[in-house]
Image: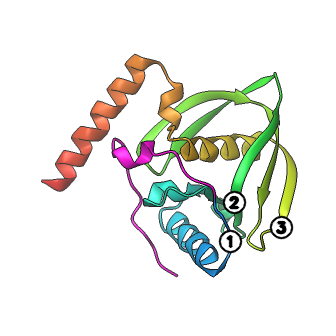
Amino acid sequence: MAIRPILTAPDPRLKAVSTDVEKVDGEIRKLAQDMADSMYAADGIGLAAVQIGVPKRIIVMDLDQKEGKKDWRAFINPKITWASEDLAVYEEGCLSVPEIYDDVERPARIRAEYLDLDGKKIEIEADGMLATCLQHEMDHLEGVLFIDHLSKLKRAMLLKKLTKAKKLAEA
């Protein structure tokens, strides 16, 4: 159990494309636990391994944690196998893009497959917050931040704001 620092934009490591997990073993389970601990410490509902500087295809999520429950799940080597044509808009935020929130349009429903912490293949259908959060976290595995879905002008303004805030914090 370790809380690891979460990278923030514009850190170039957040743009890394993550590699598949070859084998679900004790090391991967420990990484997932560290990710969950880091996510809870930052008061988040999802975290990709790349956000703590480990470019592996692992996500942890806990959509119930805002209600004081802790029941996180790991999604290892997740893949979207189907996405609906109908779209949904949710306001998104990100632990790697602190204090920035904006509307993002994504497929409203998806089907996904992944490995759990026992290495068992799981298939799910998701909609609502689960579909949005999975897509958001899976974007991280491809080096994509939610702000990359915004207009170039808006993204540039937000990155400038983040860079300025980082410099002030370091001063």
Residue hosting label 1: 70
Q: Position of residue 142 (x, y in %)?
A: 56, 41
Whether residue 32 is situated above or below residue 12 in the rendered picture: below
Residue hosting label 2: 76
Rendering quarter of residue 86:
top right
The residue carrying pointer 3 sits among few (fewer than 14), some (14 to 19) or many (20 or more) residues within 10 Å by Cα, namely few
- Residue sticking out furthest to the front: 22
Is the C-beta separation of discs 3 and 1 under 8 Å? no
Q: Position of residue 144 (x, y in %)?
A: 51, 37
The residue carrying pointer 2 sits among few (fewer than 14), some (14 to 19) or many (20 or more) residues within 10 Å by Cα, namely many
Whether residue 12 is situated above or below residue 43 in the rendered picture: above
Q: Which label lies toward us, 3 or 1? A: 3
Q: Give the alpha-carbon distance from disc 3 to disc 1, as whole Å.
A: 22 Å
Q: Is most of the magenta stretch helix, strand or loop?
A: loop
Q: Residue at x 85, y 58 (%)?
A: 122
Q: Position of residue 6 (x, y in %)?
A: 42, 59
Q: Residue at x 50, y 41 (%)?
A: 143
Q: Is residue 49 visible?
A: yes
Please report the bounds of the magenta region as a residue range.
1-20
Residue hosting label 3: 120
**Tag 1, which secondary structure?**
loop
Q: Residue at x 17, y 55 (%)?
A: 170
Disc 2 marks which amino acid?
Ile
- Of the residues under marks 3 and 2, which one precedes in the sequence? 2
